[in-house]
Image: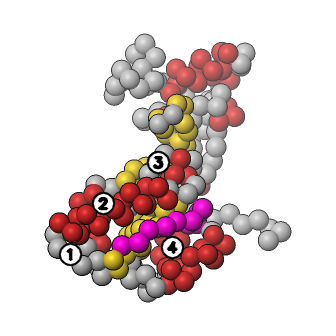
């Protein structure tokens, strides 16, 4: 899932306070899971903005709503009229949704309410951890399902650095050494011999080869 974090309220207010009308627009998929971008969050943020407007005697009409995903055209069908009439849109989607919405409504300013942080999982309720950086060349098959790109602070591909100690990263005793996790996992799988195999230098061109990446299904 994509994890995001709501921007500081003062930063959001400074972006939108110059408008006379604003739609606070939620996204009810990824960022709603981390309780930052769904309809509920849009409603709360809209209320806070109304209170700030009242305190500063700023005239601005603020409405709120949302759709399932701000990164696919069909979900916009039911809100087309609302968004076309909006003077400005405050999007509670990830950076992808903000850009997608901005491209659909070229004459309308679209502002981000969130900072998109990482691709992660949910090991416990209310807790999210980074697991993937979408590097474009997955090596999880040879590292026991542990990603050194996202989980090793130095992105090492052939074992830990000299700074790891007792299974922890040198940056913090609270951060597991990714390569200790790899070794433990390979040992549990009975595949520790794979640890001796040398991983070639990563082809980072697959990360950003020729600009923004895309993927097209040939049957569509």
206 is higher (above) or lower (below) than 81: above
**Label of residue 58 in the image:** 1
Q: At 47% from the left edge and 55% from the top edge, which residue is drawn?
A: 40
Q: Earlier in the sequence, mark 1 or mark 4?
A: 1
Magenta part of the chain = 62-71
Check the image and name the residue furthest to the right: 219
Locate residue 137, reporting x and y percent: 63, 47
Q: Earlier in the sequence, mark 4 or mark 3?
A: 3
Q: CA distance from mark 2 to mark 1?
A: 13 Å
Whether tag 2 and tag 3 are in contact, CB under 8 A, the answer is: no
Near mark 4 (Cα within 10 A), the count class, few <14, some 14-19 or many ≥20, is many
Q: Earlier in the sequence, mark 2 or mark 1?
A: 2
Task: Point out the frontmost of discs 2 and 3.
Answer: 2
Classified by dominant secondary structure, the portion drawn in magenta counts as strand
* 114 within the magenta span: no
Picture quadrant where residue 192 is located = top right
Near mark 3 (Cα within 10 A), the count class, few <14, some 14-19 or many ≥20, is some
Locate residue 39, reporting x and y percent: 49, 59
Q: CA distance from mark 2 to mark 3?
A: 16 Å
Q: Which residue is mark 2?
A: 48
Q: Which residue is mark 4?
A: 101
Q: Which residue is mark 3?
A: 35
Whether tag 1 and tag 4 are in contact, CB under 8 A, the answer is: no
């Amino acid at each position: 899932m994509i994890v995001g974090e709501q921007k500081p309220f003062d930063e959001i207010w400074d972006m939108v306070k110059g408008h006379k009308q604003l739609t606070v627009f939620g996204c009810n998929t990824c960022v709603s899971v981390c309780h930052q971008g769904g309809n509920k969050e849009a409603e709360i943020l809209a209320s806070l903005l109304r209170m700030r407007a009242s305190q500063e005697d700023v005239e601005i009409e603020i409405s709120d709503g949302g759709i399932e995903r701000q990164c696919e055209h069909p979900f916009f069908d039911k809100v087309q009229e609302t968004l076309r009439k909006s003077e400005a849109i405050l999007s509670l989607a990830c950076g992808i949704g903000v850009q997608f919405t901005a491209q659909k409504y070229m004459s309308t300013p679209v502002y981000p309410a969130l900072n998109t942080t990482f691709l992660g999982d949910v090991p416990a309720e209310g807790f999210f951890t980074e697991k993937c950086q979408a590097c474009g060349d997955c090596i999880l098959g040879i590292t026991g399902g542990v990603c050194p790109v996202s989980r090793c602070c130095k992105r090492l591909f052939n074992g830990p650095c000299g700074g790891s100690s007792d299974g922890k990263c040198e940056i913090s005793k609270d951060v597991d050494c990714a390569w200790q996790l790899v070794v433990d996992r390979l040992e549990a799988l009975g595949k520790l011999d794979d640890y001796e195999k040398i991983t070639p230098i990563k082809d980072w061109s697959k990360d950003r080869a020729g600009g923004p990446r895309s993927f097209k299904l040939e049957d569509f």
